Image: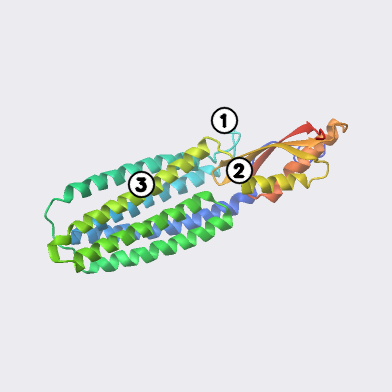
Amino acid sequence: MDKSPNAKSRTISNDAAKPLYREAVRASVVGLVINILLGGIKLSAGIVSGSFALISDAVNSLGDVLTTVAVLVAIHFAQKPPDDNHPYGHTRAEAIAGVNVAVVVLLSALGVGWEAITRLTEMHSMPPVWTLWIAGINVAIKEGLYQYKVRVGRRTGSTAVLANAWDHRSDAFASFAVLIGLSIVRLGEGERFLWADEVAALFVVLAIAWSTSKLFMDCASELMDVQANPEILDSIREAALRVPGVLGVETLWVRKSGLEYLADIHIEVDPEISVLEGHRISHHVRDELLLHEVALRDVLVHLEPWREG
């Protein structure tokens, strides 16, 4: 009987990835709290001052709140253990949530953009000078969130957190556009430049559309089982080749599933070895890869006979 530690069960689990999920949740909660505060402040300031650019920027922040809540819920479901109906687990929940949230936020942005266009020909009052301070502080906070989440994303290898970080960077650029628009309105020649506020709002809409479109494509690619990036493939291939008895790697497919990955690898072994020896080599490869790549949820190993040349 095979005494391999993994032969007794094929239940897919990855306890080693739990710290990655915890750190992703922590970073998301920080962003959630800050976006709620920023969104409320900018919305109130935009309504009081009559600045549509601030209102559109507030919609952006509140849209980020929706995105973050969906990500948090998805991360919760993604960590549920596999069951009879979901033998690979529930890690795709994050991508499903991301696709739906991206569509909702994009539609909201288009609504804001249409409102900004219709307001270009309307008469409205000049926003007060304190709106400049709100826009400026927002730029600094959003850039700070970007720097924080980039560090978390790189440390955990989470593309979701990295994508969220770039969303904050696009927010910072959008808020900078609002700051410029409000500055032109305040420092320009009176009512001649009031249109700059709406133009700044349109730049915000473009920033939202760009970030949400990228989010949609990333999540859709994950649901379509796109091949992992070359760095991950090379790392897994090199780790497999270090296992004694592995003479080559014929095929390697790696697909992203939430914060983790699933791999299918065809290794080449000596065609003269016994079935039992080949079985042990395959388990050694699986164990080595799961140890080598923390974000790797499971590996399916297939044996091929080694052919020289």
Residue visible at 20% across and 67% down in the picture: 186
Q: Are marks 1 and 2 in contact (CB under 8 Å)?
A: no
Look at the picture and state if 132 lies above or below 201.
below
The CA distance from mark 3 to mark 1 is 36 Å
Q: Please, which residue is most extreme toward the front here?
A: 309
Q: Nearer the viewer, mark 3 or mark 1?
A: 3
The residue where tag 2 is placed is 261
Q: Residue 209 carries which label?
A: 3
Task: Name the quarter where the C terminus is drawn.
Answer: top right
User: Residue 85's mark?
Assistant: 1
Identified by mark 3, the residue type is Ala
What whole-number distance in Å separates the C-alpha atoms at marks 2 and 3?
Answer: 28 Å
Instruction: Tell me the element at label 3.
Output: helix
- Residue drawn 60% across and 43% down? 261
Q: Which mark is residue 266?
A: none
Q: Quadrant of residue 215?
A: top left
Q: Is residue 228 visible?
A: yes
Q: In this view, does 171 lie to the left or right of 17?
A: left
* Residue at figure coordinates x 55%, y 44% from the top left: 79
51 up-or-down from 231: above or below: below
